[in-house]
Image (cartoon, rainbow, N blue to C red):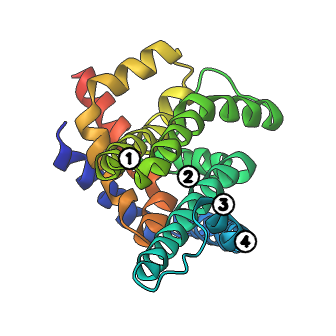
Amino acid sequence: MTLSDGITYNIRGLWLGLKTPKLLFWGLVRFFMVIAITIISATFILSYHQEILNLIWSKPESAWIIWLWHMFSWLLSFILVGVSAVISYLVSQILFSVIIMDHMSRITEIKMTGNVKEPEKMPMIKLFLYLIRQEIPRTIIPVMISLILMMGGLTPIGPVLAILSSCIAAVFLAWDNTDLLPARRLFTFKERFGFLKKNILFHLGFGLPFLIPVLNLLFLSFAPVGATIYQLDKNSVDQK
């Protein structure tokens, strides 16, 4: 699977999600909940913008460099909004999104194959705790690493770190979705991580739409659909 295959499956999942009533409903629930949490988070973080700015760089008295200070202030605002978006995504994942993602993956699997294959039926609480456990290596740790690298954007190697952190985030956000079906079928973490390593280019392609501002929320909301289609197609090919 290539980079373009990843993009194709993401778009294919979005299209199927938008035209399937159940998937559309749950995708929109996730979409609007993430937006609401992002607005609340950004409002809270930006309320401390001036204090953070003063800690980093007090307003200069010289009229010759104050324009540079204003530019830095705008850059800091942009970074804070980005940080709030990342925090909001992680909070939403822990609180409700991971359950919605699994549910959308199940709906897709039923639509594509007629049933959901899983070794055992878990009670809701056990399922929730199991899914949260999967989120730690799959999303929380990688996204936090990307966030730390993002903060390095104020250094001379900022552009390089920005590209690196974006690629890391894209790959692991894609894996967070493609791993739903293997995790539900109780494949070991070693097997699932090995699958990611063998398909890095596909996951980078699948995750690239997540880097498009504003539209990324829409793609993320319906990503479980395309990721599940991909896994089902791949399983079909492997069986042949």
Q: Dot 1, how many residues are within 10 Å of its Cα: few (below 14), some (14-19), or many (20+)?
A: many
Quarter of the rendering occupied by the N terminus: top left
**Residue at 35% from the left image edge and 45% from the top image edge:** 161
Tell me what residue is drawn at x 33 percent, y 55 percent: 10
Query: Within 10 angstroms of label 3, few (less than 14), some, or many (20 or more) residues?
Result: few
Pointer 2: what residue? 104
Disc 4 is placed on an element classified as helix
Taking depth in this image into account, of 45 and 137 the one nearest to the observer is 45
Residue 119 figure quarter: top right
**Residue at numbered disc 1:** 170
Q: Is residue 72 above or below residue 124?
A: below
Quadrant placement of the C terminus: top left
What percent of the width, then of the height, locates residue 9?
A: 29, 51
Q: Position of residue 160 (x, y in %)?
A: 28, 46
* Earlier sequence position, callout 2 versus callout 1: 2
Amino acid type, callout 1: Ala
Q: How far separated are the C-alphas under marks 4 and 1?
A: 24 Å
Q: Secondary structure at mark 1?
A: helix
Identify the disc placed on residue 217.
none
Q: CA distance from mark 1 to mark 3?
A: 32 Å
Does residue 111 appear in this view?
A: no
> Which of pointers 4 and 3 indicates the residue nearer the eye?
3
Mark 2 or mark 3: name the one nearer the start of the chain: 3
Q: Position of residue 45 (x, y in %)?
A: 69, 66
Looking at the image, residue 220 sits to the left or right of residue 134; the answer is: left
Query: Of the numbered discs in the image, which one, if any, rests on residue 40?
Result: 4
**Residue at label 3?**
55
